[in-house]
Image (cartoon, rainbow, N blue to C red):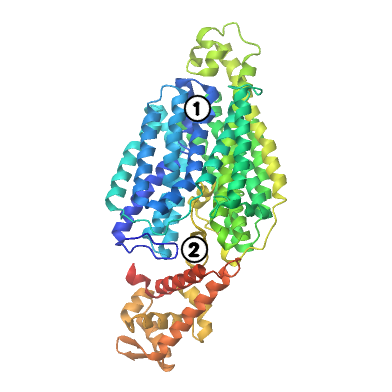
Amino acid sequence: MTTPSAEAGPQVLPRTRVWAIFGGLMLAMLLAALDQTIVATALPTIVSDLGGAEHLSWVVTAYMLASTATTVLWGKLGDLFGRKTLFIACIVIFLAGSILAGTSQTMGQLVAWRAVQGAGGGGLMVLSQAIIGDVVPPRERGRYQGLFGAVFGVSSVAGPLLGGFFVDNLDWRWVFYINIPVGALALIVVASVLPRIAAGARPRIDYAGIILLATLSTAIVLVTSLGGTTWEWSSAPVYAMAALAIGSLVAFIAVERRAPEPVLPLHLFRSRVFSAAAVIGFAVGFAMFGAITYLPLYLQTVKGSTPTESGLEMTPMMLGLLITSIGSGQLISRTGRYKIYPILGTAITAAGLYLLSLMGQDTTTLQAGLSMFVFGAGLGMVTQVLVIAVQNDVGYRDLGTATSGTTYFRTIGASIGVAVFGTVFSGRLTAELADDVPGTAQGACAPEALAASTQTLARCAPEVQAWFLDAYSGALHVVFLGAVPVALLAFVLTWLLPEVELRTATRGGDGAPGHAAGASFALPSSRTSLEELRMILWRRVGRRDPLRVYEMTAGEVGLSPAEAWMVTRVSLKHTRSVRLMAERAATSEQVVRDVAGALAARGLVDVDGDTVRALPAADAVAEAIREAERERLRRYVAEWPDGDEPEVAQLVDQLTQELMADRADHAERA
């Protein structure tokens, strides 16, 4: 057996087996998605237990860096060696990282094992989506991809709540141990039901580009996170990392110019839309994750909330993100205009960050919730819109890499943002704790002891507690306030984002809540350009009411939508039962007989009692309807440069068959 290429259809499997496969993939995707959010509410407790507050940001950064650096590689290796074995390997790697993270005794160990988790998590993300393409026909993929998006939506809210629950009722280590039963179940399901699909055409993998991009990203994050704290700015390690970053960048540019299939084609940067979206996404990711990481610290340490309470208190942020993300998607679908939303979104995000910077010991839960809601509402108008803008501007052949590249810049911005704000927080907290130290701040209540772990704070004298919380609140104030200029920079850059008239096929992205959250937290995708185009077309033309679609094609042959529907349906199997057609159409038999009578008068069908039989002329009319549908799809893809490529023409034919079969014969296949 061979893997279906982008042009070939997936394996035909029984529906029960497809759902079993999908259940395993959903569990695996849930593992990776939860780990982007579940750790946040546990961070204060982890720091109190393990110490090493100066390395707190690396618990998040290590996971994100490892997953981002390996995403493209896992996708390419899946094409090369087949996906089942690699997917199982990713689950094992992720579980190993989870077990080791749960047994960590120092912050350094935890950071290292989080990187192992991230390497496995990157594979779970990309291979889950690729496997769906192997086993699910195109007309069904929208449903499954939408459910994948829903996993992100659920995990973005459930992650902080679960993290808080485990810390309050079990132990922070269960934040990682919970992955073991879920991952084991996913492993059993995937290993038993996923078909072994061998590799087909072998892609040319840009190994050098992938390694150099990962090296560049890591070097930048190391300098921004360790410079000025662990390493002096003028120290040899900082100079070495800076030199490594510059050298990697130069080598990356040289490699990408010659690579037959570059991981990030340099010609994309000639597009003003892509370049602007990349920089805006970087800035938004920088501010977004930098702030999100430190919200639980404020809620638990300064406000005294339990981890579970802090998870609940963060839900207004996700609510704001979901509302504006869904709303902006719907408005873009109706108006075809997108530029205003990133402009408004970055301005609102900056306002939200400023409001977060005002939070202190006396801030009420309502005030904090409103501030977080404003922050989330701003983010929801930016992230998914940037992807829409880029997909609309680039040529067909660059759809895959441009989509992945846009997400990469936001993710790497997030990694650097978390690292930079970690450095800012650590440095500012040290400075704040050096001022007006109470005389009773001794031993376990000494500044350096409390900075490393707040576990003993409750046993300190009241004046020490008040002094420490003021210092902690002051350090967090600087973190949130420091993110405001970054968001304002993104606001300025959004005015440089050109507004290109939206192609018909790119209007109306998925407005599902899961998609909205997925757009904010997802890792770069390694879907090919053809797969991206297929998804765009199905979002545009594959989800409409059947009779409404026939309104678009029936006029080409002078029939009513109902008549066109029946001609196509009867032509497929040459005879149809009036009773069954009435059941399938949820209408009366008399209505079906009236439509059949109209077609009989035109010489297209013959009606004999309960049976409607297609005459030779019906086949020609049905083919004309299918050709009208093909032409409609051709008009969509023709709006892309390179839209006349042979594989695109083949995709149009496949989608036409799927669409018309779905509309004509959906019930029989359901």
Q: Residues within 10 Å of mark 2 (few under 14, many from 20)?
A: many
Quadrant in which residue 335 is drawn: bottom right
Query: Would you say residue 370 is visible in this rendering?
Result: no
Q: Is residue 430 visible?
A: yes
Name the one closer to the observer, 644 or 374: 644
Q: Residue 445: x percent and y percent?
A: 53, 11
Q: What percent of the width, then of the height, locates residue 147?
A: 43, 53
For the point 33% across and 69% down, which residue is it? 669
* Nearer to the camera, 663 or 51: 51
Amino acid at pointer 1: Ser
User: Residue 58: x and y, percent?
Assistant: 52, 30
Instruction: Indicate the quadrant where residue 451 lies.
Output: top right
**Of the residues under marks 2 and 1, which one precedes in the sequence?**
1
What percent of the width, then of the height, locates residue 564? 45, 82
Q: CA distance from mark 2 to mark 1?
A: 47 Å
Q: Image height check: is 187 above or below 228?
A: below
Dot 2 amino acid type: Arg
- The local secondary structure at tag 2 comes to helix
**What label does residue 534 carry, if any?**
2
Q: Give the number of the disc on residue 305.
A: 1
Mark 2 and mark 1 residues within 8 Å of each other at the beta carbon: no
Mark identifier at residue 93? none
Left or right placement of residue 180 versus residue 106 in this view: left
Give the answer, above or below, for where 146 lies relative to 570. above
- Which residue corresponds to the image point at 51% horizontal and 21% vertical from the top-left? 52
Which SS class for mark 1?
loop
**Nearer to me, 302 or 27:** 27
**Quadrant housing the C terminus:** bottom left
How many marks the image carries: the answer is 2
